[in-house]
Image: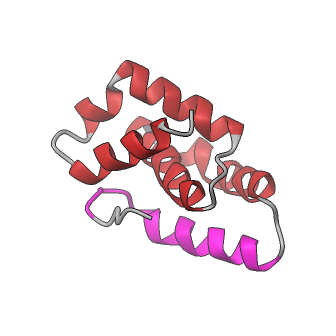
Amino acid sequence: MIDLSSIEFDFLEYIQEEWDSYMEEGCDIEDATSQILMQYEDMLDEKERIALYIVLGNIQMDLAFIDQRVKAEISEIIASKIADEMFEGNKQIKKVLSQVKKYL
């Protein structure tokens, strides 16, 4: 997993911890993704929402399976180049997007 501590995303630590707890409880990737999206997606601004999907892509990439919703959002993020604009110069974001792109 690529270290994303350099991104400005207040929920980063919580999402990673929650993901781990869902996995420990025996949830599959789709269920864990659903739980996290339901909890966070509606309360985030556009930049935070993009960061959420990048974090989920980063986590799931290590599991060699990326949820279809995460794939679709990251595909759109890559195509629109919006992450480049919002996270200008952040090399970790570019690494994650480049790696996740291999799974698309």
- By secondary structure, the bulk of the magenta-drawn segment is best described as helix
In front of the other: 14 or 25: 25
In the rendered image, residue 11 lying in the magenta stretch gets the answer: yes
Is residue 79 toward the left or the right of residue 72 in the image? left
Seen as rendered, the residue at the extreme top is 80
Is residue 77 toward the left or the right of residue 17 in the image? left
- What is the tally of numbered marks visible in this picture? 0
Using the image, determine if residue 47 lies above or below residue 79.
below
- Return the x and y of residue 64 as percentages of the image width and height: 62, 55
**Residue drawn 22% across the image and 50% down it:** 91
- Return the x and y of residue 58 as percentages of the image width and height: 49, 55
Q: Quadrant of the C terminus?
A: top right
Seen as rendered, the residue at the extreme left is 89
Using the image, determine if residue 97 lies above or below residue 65.
above
**Residue drawn 26% across the image and 33% down it:** 84
Is residue 102 toward the left or the right of residue 40 in the image? left
- Return the x and y of residue 66 as percentages of the image width and height: 64, 47
**Residue drawn 80% across the image and 55% down it:** 31
Q: Quadrant of the N terminus?
A: bottom left
- Return the x and y of residue 103 as percentages of the image width and height: 56, 39
Scheme by which the image is coloured: secondary structure
In front of the other: 38 or 104: 104
Residues shaded magenta: 6-25
In the rendered image, residue 85 lying in the magenta stretch gets the answer: no
Is residue 45 toward the left or the right of residue 64 in the image? left
For residue 97, what is the image quadrant? top left
In front of the other: 67 or 83: 67
